Image: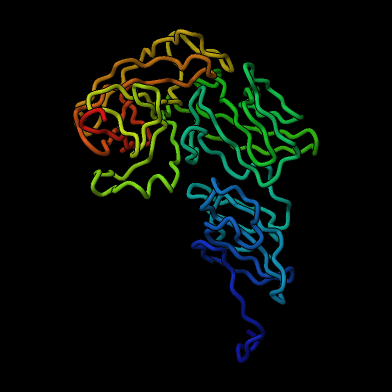
Amino acid sequence: MNATGTGLVYSTFLSGTQADTIAFAAVTAAGIYLSGQAQSTDFPGLEGAPVQCLPSAYETRLSLDGLTITAARMVPGNAMAYDQATGMLLAWTGADLIGFDPAAPPAPITCILDAADLQPVTSIAPGELLSIFSEHLPFWGGISYGTFPSSLGGITVTFNGIAGPLLYVSTQQINVQAPYEIAGGAQTTLTLNTQQTNTSDSRTLPVIARNPVAFLTTPAYADIEKCDLVLLGYPPGPFPLAFNSDGSPNTCLNPAVAGSVVRIFLAGLGVTVPPLVTGSVNPSPGIPLNLPITFGGGLAATMVSAIALPGSISGVWQVDVRMPANRGAVSVSLFVDSVPVRDTNLAIWMRATSP
C-alpha cells in the first residue's frame, strides 16, 4: 500500500509448492523482512535447503519494489521484532531471545538430525550418529570405509574440542559420530570448521545418557500403493529397516512368517559395558548388549539377541526379535534400559503361514 493507505503499489504471492506461512513482516529501508514457517524445498530464496531440515523457521528479505528475494536463511527461532538501530532481527527459540544480522551469509550449520531416523536433535548421547546439514559446503564429497578420519577435505567436527569421526561428507551433508568421551558432561558444543573457507559454526546441546532410536527406511511408493494398509491394520507408524529370518527385507509385500525372528537396528544407546571406542569398527562376532530391551503396548514378542552390528561403526546394534503370531502390520515400540526408543509404532509386516 502507499504511505497513506489509500492505494495499492503492488501485490505478489510468496510460497513454494508446500504449506508455507508468513508470521512476521518488517518494512525497512533495506527491504521487507519476512519470517514464518517454510515446508517447501522450492520456497523462494531457500532453494537448495535440505529437505530433511524442513519444516523450519525462515527469514527472507523482499525488495521494496517486490521484484527480488535476497538474504534468505533458516533461523533457529520465530522472528518477533526488528531493531532499527542495529539492523538486527530478534527471534524466540522457545527458550531464548536471540538477535542476528539478517543480511549476513547463511551459517554453515542449517540443522542437526539423528542419522538413523533423520529426526531433529535436541540433545546428544555419547556415540550417537549425527547428520549435519548445510545449504552449501566447500567439498566435493567423500565416504569413509573401514576407518573413520577426523578430517575430510579440511572439514572437521568437534565436541567440546574432541574431534568426531567422519563417516560421510558432501556439499550439503556431514555424517559424524559424537565421541563417547562427552559422557558425564552436562552439555557439549558441536563445532563445524571448514578450512577451505576458514569459517566455523557451532551449536551447544545437552548431553544425555541415552537417546535410543531405530534405523528407519522409506519404502517405494509403488510398492506401498499395492498394499491395502487398512486391511493389513497399519498402525500408522514409521517403517523400520527390518529383515526377515531369510535375510530379505520386511515389507508389506514380503511379510515375515508369524512367530519368526525379525531383525531391526538401533543406535544412540550411549555408554555400554564393555565400553565402546569412538570411531572403532565392531568385531565379529558382535559384543552382546548389556542393557535390557523391553516391549511396550503389551506386545507378545520375545528378545532373541542384541549385539553390536559386526563390521559397522561402534554404537550400531542389531536386535533380533521373535514376533508374535499376528497377521498384518504389527506395531512395535521398544524400551532400552527403561528409556523409550523415540520411534514408536514401528510397523513389522507378518503373514500367517509361509507361501
Q: Of 246 and 303, which appears nearest the observer?
A: 246
Question: Horizontal and vertical percent for residue 106?
Answer: 69, 50
Q: How is the image coloured?
A: rainbow
Please give the name of the residue rendered at 36% of the width and 16% of the height, measured from the top-left corner.
Answer: 306
Task: Check the picture and name the quadrant holding the N terminus.
Answer: bottom right
In the picture, measured across the screen, residue 131 lies left or right of residue 344, that is right
Q: Quadrant of residue 156?
A: top right
Q: Is residue 234 above or below residue 271?
A: below
Q: Is residue 149 above or below residue 96?
A: above
Task: Check the picture and name the quadrant holding the C terminus.
Answer: top left
Question: Horizontal and vertical percent for residue 250?
Answer: 36, 32
In the picture, measured across the screen, residue 61 lies left or right of residue 77, that is right
Q: Is residue 289 above or below residue 8?
A: above
Q: Of 237 and 103, which appears nearest the observer?
A: 237
Q: Of 156 and 236, which appears nearest the observer?
A: 236
Please give the name of the residue rendered at 63% of the width and 90% of the height, measured from the top-left corner.
Answer: 7
Question: Horizontal and vertical percent for residue 110?
Answer: 62, 45
Specify the farthest residue to the bottom.
6
Q: Quadrant of residue 339?
A: top left
Q: Across the whole image, how many numbered discs are drawn on residues?
A: 0
Question: Horizontal and vertical percent for residue 76?
Answer: 57, 49
Q: Quadrant of residue 236?
A: top left
In the picture, measured across the screen, residue 177 lies left or right of residue 88, that is left
Q: Is residue 107 above or below residue 84?
A: above
Please give the name of the residue rendered at 50% of the width and 20% of the height, measured from the top-left corner.
Answer: 183
